[in-house]
Amino acid sequence: MKALENSIIKDISLAPDGRLKIDWVKAHMPVLNRIREQFEREQPFKGLKVAISLHLEAKTAYLAKVVQAGGAEVTITGSNPLSTQDDVCAALVEDGVTVYAKHNPDPAEYKELMVKTLETRPDLIIDDGGDLVSILHSERPDLLEQVRGGAEETTTGILRLKAMEKEGKLQFPMVAVNDAFCKYLFDNRYGTGQSVWDGINRTTNLVVAGKTVVVVGYGWCGKGVAMRAKGLGANVVVTEIDAIKGVEAYMDGFRVMPMTEAARIGDFFVTVTGNRDCIREEHFKVMKDGAILSNAGHFDVEVNIPELAAAAVSKRTVRKNIEEYELADGRKIYLLAEGRLVNLAAGDGHPAEIMDMTFALQAMAIKYVNDNYEKIGNNVLNVPYEIDEQVARYKLQSLDITIDRLTEEQKAYLDSWTEH
């Protein structure tokens, strides 16, 4: 089997467990199932190679299988060392997908697995955090020529892409899936909100009700985390650098203050900014004994871990995915999942029904790029509204929900400026 010969995974014998996981999510992803049927008929990727870098768990695996059903030769790697599930990797290999991924590789191996994915010379890319695109442009420009374009999953990745675009460095079009309505309204808000607390709760086994939760950043992910914390009975504090979002958090019923103040009162901290050093040395100095730190941004830089380690006199693992840092004055600060994405490194990520819409957008976005790459330029593009709206309609249909349509008279009224 070609995929098995080429792949680098932990253990092919784990495949049966991975297949059960993939079958479970497939049963709860009706939008992606519908797109798979379309792809099987139309074969939009016939003869093409698609490289994917996403959190490699069951829902991602099913996206890979949908793209494969469209005729593509698919190669996949993980976008975070701790979120890769080895049994899911094995099941994908058995299904003919080439996989370069293992759970928790060292940094050098993690990078090498990404490079191997790119060395398959893909025509299309699905990226998460911008690593594949960054490596292509900075380290392996020899592999750029064949790439037609791709799609990006996250806020962090889009920031990197827009920086490349601004400098005139981006060599192919990339669709900003994260900025689509059916992504940020549901995935970022409801998906992140639920999965972050799934990860924190299963990891700590501590009560949230009555505690003070500090949410660092009030974008769509922060909104979801705060909303779910409130539902669990927490007292929620929001820190922000954006005045408009600060007002929004206040009007949503949350206390808003700078991190220097929030650090003193927080029991749980969740960073969701896409930026670095949001919690750092000055904050560690004033935190409560027993404060719990977690991150839901893409990279493990939102909590300054080197500064935390430097302030500590000892460090030990006290529970799976919980590291205890004891400071000189005896206070203990706990870091979850090494500061990586707590919902994936210490959980199973977003619910299947949520990722159904996001991955439907990914699949349709790379089809759009493939159909139009010669004329759309080397830019960061929004998901066309028609694709966004179609995914929403498929979702409503799967729920057996219908909505109204405008009458011809209503359309004429809205298009008129003279008769109102």
Image: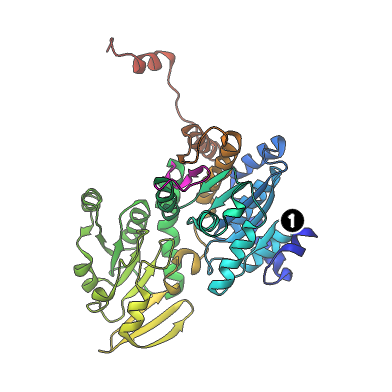
* Residue depicted at x 63% and y 44%: 33
Work out whether residue 220 or residue 405 is closer to the camera in this orientation and state it.
Answer: 220
Residue 132 in view here:
yes
Please tell me whether residue 380 belongs to the stretch shown in magenta.
Answer: no
Q: Is residue 314 above or below residue 71?
A: below
Q: Is residue 60 above or below residue 12?
A: above
Q: Which residues are magenta?
A: 167-180
* Residue depicted at x 19% and y 62%: 257
Image position, residue 18 (x, y; %): 66, 63
Work out whether residue 268 or residue 148 is closer to the camera in this orientation and state it.
Answer: 148
User: Crowding near pointer 1: few (<14 within 10 Å), some, many (20+)?
Assistant: some
Q: Is residue 14 above or below residue 169?
A: below
Q: Is residue 210 above or below residue 32?
A: below
Quarter of the image holding residue 275? bottom left
* Residue depicted at x 23% and y 75%: 282
Residue reaching furthest to the top = 419
Q: Is residue 88 left or right of residue 249?
A: right
* Residue depicted at x 24% and y 79%: 285
Q: Is residue 161 left or right of residue 1?
A: left
Q: Amino acid at mark 1?
A: Gly
Please tell me whether residue 177 belongs to the stretch shown in magenta.
Answer: yes
Q: Quadrant of the N terminus?
A: bottom right
Q: What residue does disc 1 label?
A: 96
Image position, residue 123 (x, y; %): 63, 46
Label 1: which secondary element? loop
Image position, residue 133 (x, y; %): 52, 53
